[in-house]
Amino acid sequence: MSVGRIVGQNMRSLREARAVVLADVARAARAVGLSWDASAVSRIETGARQLTLDEFLTLPRIMTAALCEPTTLVTLLADGTGSLSETWALLAEPGVAHLAVEAIPDLARKAVECSKRAAETQGGDTDLYDRAAELGVTPEALSDAMTELWDVRSLRAERERRLRESDTDLSQPTRARTARGHLTRQLMAELRHHLAENGQ
């Protein structure tokens, strides 16, 4: 199996596990300057379309934005055993085989941190841990509550879904920002009520 197939399969597994559609990944890719549509994402996931080096290195940012949770190159390169052994064997060309595996998580973590900072400055969702602290519950309890209420694991994903369904003119940045703030407060109130009803 090629590296591209491994990455594609992992993209699909992560996406489907979080009920994210192909168009969401394509939208996140376009936000970083790539011209992907849902069809391109599907072809990447099935191995019918290979990633360029630039696309591959940008993929953690794309998937982090689409899934609304940190996604690293390590996650995208993991083989079916949960390790990187098969992938590293595929990458073991001269000059690559000696690459320190320890360096990859650091590089991926830096990419995720940059993506997170960019999302926060653009009105993106606060980290799950911050929301959980604000509500006085564990991140796991908050994640479970969001799944029970909305069948998603991200406040941001639910907020953006509701925003798309509203009549808000998203071409007006000020109106979109105001609507996001209102929806965030509404969703937090729903979570507080749900958690209180369940004794948390």
Image (tube, rainbow, N blue to C red):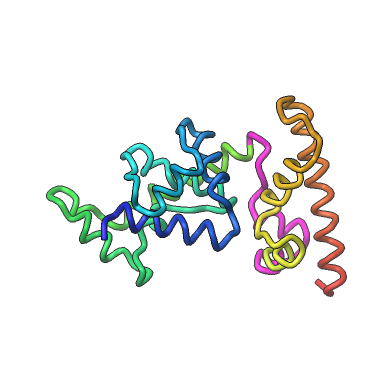
**Residue at point 58%, 54% (across, down):** 20
- Residue extending farthest to the left is 94
Q: Quadrant of residue 74?
A: bottom left
Q: Is residue 197 magenta?
A: no
Q: Is residue 129 magenta?
A: yes
- Residue extending farthest to the bottom is 199
Quadrant, the C terminus: bottom right
The residue stretch that appears in magenta? 121-142
From the top left corner, tell me how far across and down residue 52 is, in percent: 32, 39
Tell which of 70 and 129 is nearer to you.
70
* Vertical placement of residue 197 versus 134, above or below: below
From the top left corner, tell me how far across and down residue 109 is, in percent: 45, 50
**Residue at point 79%, 29% (across, down):** 175
Tell which of 40 and 177 is nearer to you.
40
Q: Quadrant of residue 91?
A: bottom left
**Residue 191 in the figure: left or right of residue 6:** right
From the top left corner, tell me how far across and down residue 142 is, in percent: 71, 64
**Residue 199 in the figure: left or right of residue 45:** right
Query: How many numbered marks, from 0 up?
Result: 0
**Residue at point 50%, 39% (across, down):** 37
Quadrant, the N terminus: bottom left
**Residue at point 44%, 53% (across, down):** 72
Tell which of 32 and 199 is nearer to you.
32
From the top left corner, tell me how far across and down residue 15 is, in percent: 52, 56
Q: Quadrant of residue 139?
A: bottom right
